[in-house]
Amino acid sequence: MWLADLIGGLAVLVLGFAVVFFSWQLPYMSEYGPGPGFLPRWIGFGIVGCALVVIIKVLRKHDKSGAFFKPLTKMGVKALILIIIAFLLFPLLGFSVGLGLFVGVSMRVMGKHGWISCGITAVVTAIAIHYIFAGWLSIPLPTGLIGW
Amino acid sequence: MDLLHNLYTGFTIALTWTNIFYCLVGVFFGQIVGVLPGIGAPTAIALLLPMTFTVNPTSALIMFAGIYYGVAYGGTITSVLINVPGESSTVMTCLDGYQMALKGRAGAALSIAAIGSWIAGTGSVIILMTFAPALAKFALRFGPSEYFALAAMAFGLLTVFGGEQPIKIVISTLIGLLLATIGLDIVSGLPRFAFGMPQLLGGIDFIVIICGIFGVAEVFNSIEEPEEGELIKQKMRLRDLFLTWEEWVASRWAIVRGSVIGFFIGMIPAGGITTASFLAYLAEKRYSKHPERFGTGAIEGVAAPESANNAASISGFAPLLALGIPGSPTTAVMLAGFMMWGIRPGPLLFQTKPDLVWGLIASMYIGNFLLLLMNIFLIPPFVAILRLPYTIIMGFIVIFASVGAYSVNNNIFDVWMMLGFGVLGYVMKKLEYPIVPLVLALVLGRLAENSLRQALTLSGGSLSIFFTRPISALFLCASILAYLTPVIRWAWKSMQRPKATVNT
């Protein structure tokens, strides 16, 4: 956890410097008062200052116990991968079918449910998404090859 | 008389079949959300917000308010029966509620929580009715400097109430402010942090961020750290729900004290319902003649925090409606809803949209009454929800978050951004960077920046405008004091430490 904290602090520091850099390219003051770069520049300075405090605190910490990754982190990564795959398949399958499939596959992969219940849930979910969101709420969800 | 007339108008709006339906849906859904660990009121409202584009704002707001205070009721069930708080605001209820359940008094614990919440909720609505319009009248005097100072005070108070690591709270606040600056600058028309991407010129929509940072991030966190507890297998009969005379005597003043504490803490920007329940519990323990009973099943230990969290959830509407400043993440999400519907909450809301304000306030009486009935007669079905596999709940969250993010601009880019914010929220939580300051800063960012720029333009760039106007000076002093609190606390601890060493 100590290393993760340090990396986190460094990431915030980099973000702060980036904010300062990009805000420097915006006018700090305008004809009528503060310009578009006024607040972002101070936000950048603030982030840099706070990140330095975090880094110093981490470096001075004696207790280096605790782990960033936990036994079930793998499951979280699996969920993330499944979500990414579902999103990538949207142009092909459409929103309703893509998300329905996501629910079915995640039940199988992560919950170890039976194939039949996963399949039924996937189909019911896809139909429900289509009729509730696209039909009832009139949200123009992207459609895939089957027109859903 | 005005008050009664306004309340009458409110009831004529709240008691239409449509609004009763939305209120019922809200409290029912809130109760379910409260029961389910890993999904809170801001997440639920954020996920449902995009679905209400076409709904009447008053009805949608009545539903969201129902979710907000319904969650406080629902979280109690898991706190008492499985020792797992469904909501952070019911953490304190676990301490004595679960112990009561182990002693066979689960029904009494749930009853006193429902009754206390109802009394606190109804009492708070009455105070809100008189207080909020007065606050709105007072806020009519506010100019840009006051609004900036008020936002600064809200950010400052986060460092007092927000958690153990104030520096990380400040970083979260700054990141929220940074996200609010993305897009075209409304004064100069120059793009900021858009990096040539047309999708970013309009800024990142609040709903996209909130669906990711609350919804999807919660999925990852809940998968990694499932909150599991053993359900107390105890058959609950109707008569088990009745309190004994001793239990009622022990808890009646705890309800009153909890309600008062909850109401005031809920009104403070960044106070929140969790802080309210925590402080009410501590106050009750300190006040008690037998503090040693707390943690072993004292009914006052359930009554006080439960009353406090419900009172705070109601009073949290006062700064939102009267000032346009959210006091908690849930009201921050609701503020985003106001923006989505094209309504500007604040002092003028009471004059421009009295139907919305009074309809909402009147609906709180109805919602609290419905929740009281639900919590007395419908506990077993709500407990059954706990048996739902998390993979299915996760699926629903991802569906709502994806559709919600997409529906803002009908754009897949927003869905990917939502996922990105989900990962950011997960990492932030793991590294103990709190999410709430980011959300509050994100919502208040534009108001804060615009007010700051307007005030400095008016004063010709002089900062004196913030200190020469009394209200603004007061807010800014409170803000500075709040930011200094961690330093004072640290200095105080450092002074105490050598003494403690000498004593030992």
Image (spheres, rainbow, N blue to C red):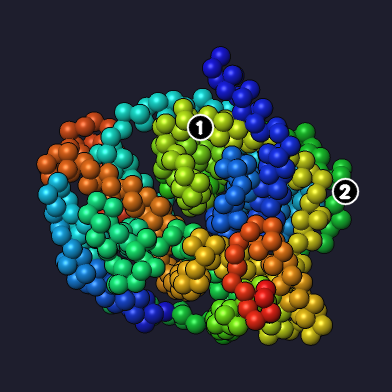
Amino acid found under the numbered disc labelled 2: Arg
- Pick the front one: B422 or A13: B422
Return the residue at label 1: B353
Lower sequence index among marks 2 and 1: 2
Q: Is residue B489 above or below residue B58?
A: below
Q: Residue at x 30, y 59 (%)?
A: B184
Percent position of residue A5, x then y: 37, 76
Q: To which chain does the residue with label 1 belong?
A: B
Q: What is the crowding at mark 1: few (fewer than 14 residues within 10 Å), some, or many (at least 20)? A: some
Return the residue at label 2: B237
Percent position of residue B398, x then y: 60, 70
Q: Residue at x 59, y 49 (%)?
A: B54
- Pick the front one: B177 or B36: B177
Q: Residue at x 60, y 83 (%)?
A: A92
What is the quadrant of residue B123 in the picture? top right
Percent position of residue B410, x then y: 52, 65
What is the quadrant of residue A109 in the picture? bottom right
SS for dot 1: loop
Amino acid found under the numbered disc labelled 1: Lys
